[in-house]
Image (tube, rainbow, N blue to C red):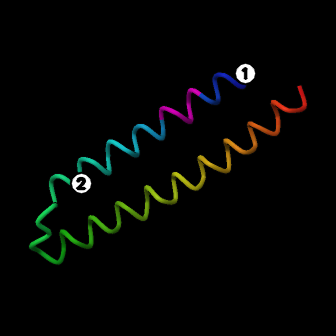
């Protein structure tokens, strides 16, 4: 069960990394203010996702310690 949770979190983290890479390479010039807003919005969503994943990993670690 814990291994499944860990794999799922790892998959989600990979998706976030890939999304950030895609946006950073496609909007590297950031010539248009709307592109900049979209890029910064993407980063804030990914940051929130990563924060939630870290909290879930801490929870998972605590569960494992009690087994």
Residue at position x 85%, y 32% from top?
Answer: 65
The overriding secondary structure of the stretch rendered in magenta is helix
Label 2: which secondary element? helix
The one nearer the camera, 11 or 65, is 65
Q: Is residue 3 left or right of residue 19?
A: right
Q: Quadrant of the N terminus?
A: top right
Disc number placed over residue 35 in the picture, else none:
none
Q: Mark 2 = which residue? A: 23
Q: Quadrant of residue 62?
A: top right
Residue drawn at x 18%, y 68% is 35
30 shown above or below 47: below
> Which sits earlier in the primary sequence, circle 1 or circle 2?
1
Q: Residue at x 56, y 36 (%)?
A: 9
When the figure is inspected, residue 6 is found, relative to residue 34, above or below; the finding is above
- Residue 10 lies within the magenta run: yes
Mark 1 to mark 2: distance in Å? 33 Å
Does 48 sit left or right of 37 as displayed?
right
Would residue 26 be counted in the magenta stretch? no
Work out which residue is located at the far bottom of the displayed protein and give it.
33
**Figure quadrant of the C terminus:** top right
Label 1 Cα neighbours within 10 Å, binned few <14 / some 14-19 / many ≥20: few
Q: Residue furthest right?
A: 66
Image vertical order of residue 62 relative to residue 34, above or below? above
Residue 57 image point, x, y percent: 67, 41
Q: Residue 19: give x, y in percent of width and height.
A: 32, 47
Residue at screen point 52% across, 52% down: 50
Residue 44 image position (x, y, % from top left): 42, 65
Residue interval drawn in magenta = 7-11
Point out residue 8 in the picture as x, y percentages from the top left corner. 56, 30
Judge the density around disc 2: few (<14), some (14-19), many (≥20) Cα neighbours within 10 Å: some
- Name the residue tied to disc 1: 1
Disc 1 element: loop
């Amino acid at each position: 069960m814990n291994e499944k949770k860990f794999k799922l979190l790892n998959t989600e983290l990979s998706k976030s990394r890939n999304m950030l890479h895609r946006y950073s390479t496609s909007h590297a010039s950031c010539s248009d203010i709307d592109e900049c807003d979209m890029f910064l919005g993407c980063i804030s969503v990914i940051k929130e996702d990563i924060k939630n994943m870290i909290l879930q990993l801490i929870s998972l670690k605590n569960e494992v310690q009690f087994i």
